[in-house]
């Protein structure tokens, strides 16, 4: 096993910029693996670290400075990610999450995989005596330690590990261990996170995996497939889009966003799956997730103009995107005991040919089977009530 501490802010040496090929990692020269770390300069991205993993036909860009986010992935020429108006990899020091009524989080929002949590997630607002900013703090917390591991034998799995601490005196003592892995010959990116409560008391927690996709998968005629037991609109505006919630239009001025809440159906292994594919089903993204700890799914349909950010989010979570104050009655604000660990698994199928897409569609259709989903015409939460 090849192992290297790439980045740390405490007791390990910061190795700075680096470039490693297969030979330098002790692998045969023809194994298609390359790793590069750079420190970005200029504007609000000054000081951000970017790790680029070239593994077989996949190129994955990870930002340890932003909670181990995945900026984007390119596989066989197909890009998985989106084009936010935010073009820089913004360093957290330039993000004031309390700005604009708790919406400052959006100043750095442009990644494919964005973790929301873990003290809270969802929309900003008051929860008792506490004001909660949008989607929590983890995304704007740099990793304390990042470790690269490369297996020396086939299938030559590459694993990138990171530790991100979410701690506040008298309040929270959370530790998040993130694991991202892939092999040169498989079209899958696996994310496995473990949240541990290092404190002496039980705490509420929330997690949403805000996974975002656009062109070339998102286009006029693109379609979303989800096996579900229940579908509801997030608010009254989304209720007007229930009839075609999974059909994607071209970029549409003044569309803004529609959000839908889903209670998914799981397979015998405890996983559910969601697939977004392009109009002719030649490529797509499959998001699979373990529903034991991520029991619900949010679909964020933001098909506004290209300049505003044309994007769809496929977001498994412990909770929907409402403010935490609304979700206790829904049973969607779990508690983690002192010393307890919660494990989250999300797998991304980077599908770049029609056969892979059709196999995913067939699997989801089989999961849905003869079960007719319950479609609620009104929101399950009355905002402002």
Image (cartoon, rainbow, N blue to C red):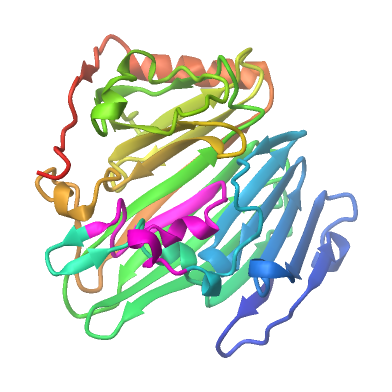
Q: Observer-nearest residue: 336 or 171?
A: 171
Residue 265 picture location, percent across and down: 30, 27
Residue, x 58% and y 26% (percent of image)? Answer: 218
* Quadrant position of the N terminus in the picture: bottom right
Note whether 271 is above or below 194 in the view shown. Answer: above
User: Quadrant of residue 29 in the image?
Assistant: bottom right
Residue 191 picture location, percent across and down: 51, 51
Question: Which residue in the rendered view is the most extreme toward the top?
Answer: 370
In magenta, the rendered stretch is 96-125
Residue 2 visible? no
Residue 21 picture location, percent across and down: 85, 61
User: Quadrant of residue 53 in the image?
Assistant: bottom right
Residue, x 9% and y 44% (percent of image)? Answer: 385
Total marks drawn?
0
Asked if residue 5 lies left or right of residue 30, the reply is left
Q: Observer-nearest residue: 154 or 317?
A: 317
Question: Which residue in the rendered view is the most extreme toward the right?
Answer: 29
Decide whether residue 110 is among the magenta residues: yes
């Amino acid at each position: 096993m090849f192992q290297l501490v790439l980045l740390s802010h405490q007791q390990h040496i910061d190795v700075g910029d680096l470039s490693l090929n297969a030979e330098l990692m002790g692998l045969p020269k023809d194994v298609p693996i390359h790793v590069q770390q750079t420190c970005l300069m200029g504007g609000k991205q000054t000081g951000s670290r970017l790790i680029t993993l070239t593994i077989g036909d996949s190129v994955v860009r990870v930002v340890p400075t932003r909670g181990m986010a995945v900026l984007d992935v390119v596989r066989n020429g197909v890009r998985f990610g989106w084009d936010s108006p935010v073009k820089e990899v913004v360093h957290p020091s330039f993000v004031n999450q309390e700005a604009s009524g708790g919406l400052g989080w959006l100043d750095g929002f442009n990644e494919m995989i964005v973790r929301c949590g873990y003290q809270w997630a969802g929309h900003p607002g008051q929860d008792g005596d506490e004001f909660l900013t949008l989607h929590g703090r983890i995304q704007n917390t740099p990793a304390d330690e990042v470790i690269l591991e490369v297996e020396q034998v086939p299938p030559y799995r590459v694993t990138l590990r990171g530790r991100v601490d979410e701690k506040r005196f008298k309040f929270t003592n959370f530790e998040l261990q993130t694991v991202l892995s892939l092999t040169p010959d498989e079209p899958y990116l696996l994310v496995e996170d473990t949240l541990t409560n290092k404190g002496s008391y039980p705490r509420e927690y929330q997690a949403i995996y805000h996974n975002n996709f656009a062109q070339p998968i998102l286009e006029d005629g693109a379609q979303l497939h989800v096996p579900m037991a229940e579908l509801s609109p997030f608010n009254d505006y989304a209720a007007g889009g229930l009839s075609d919630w999974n059909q994607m239009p071209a970029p549409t001025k003044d569309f803004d966003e529609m959000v839908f809440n889903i209670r998914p159906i799981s397979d015998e292994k405890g996983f559910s799956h969601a697939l977004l594919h392009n109009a002719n089903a030649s490529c797509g993204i499959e998001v699979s997730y373990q529903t034991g700890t991520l029991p619900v799914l949010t679909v964020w349909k933001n098909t506004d103009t290209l300049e505003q950010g044309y994007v769809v989010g496929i977001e498994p979570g412990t909770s929907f995107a409402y403010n935490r104050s609304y979700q206790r009655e829904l049973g969607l604000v779990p508690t983690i005991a002192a010393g307890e660990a919660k494990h989250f698994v999300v797998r991304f199928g980077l599908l770049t040919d029609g056969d892979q897409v059709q196999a995913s569609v067939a699997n989801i259709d089989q999961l849905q089977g003869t079960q007719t989903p319950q479609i609620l015409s009104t929101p399950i939460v009355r905002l402002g009530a």
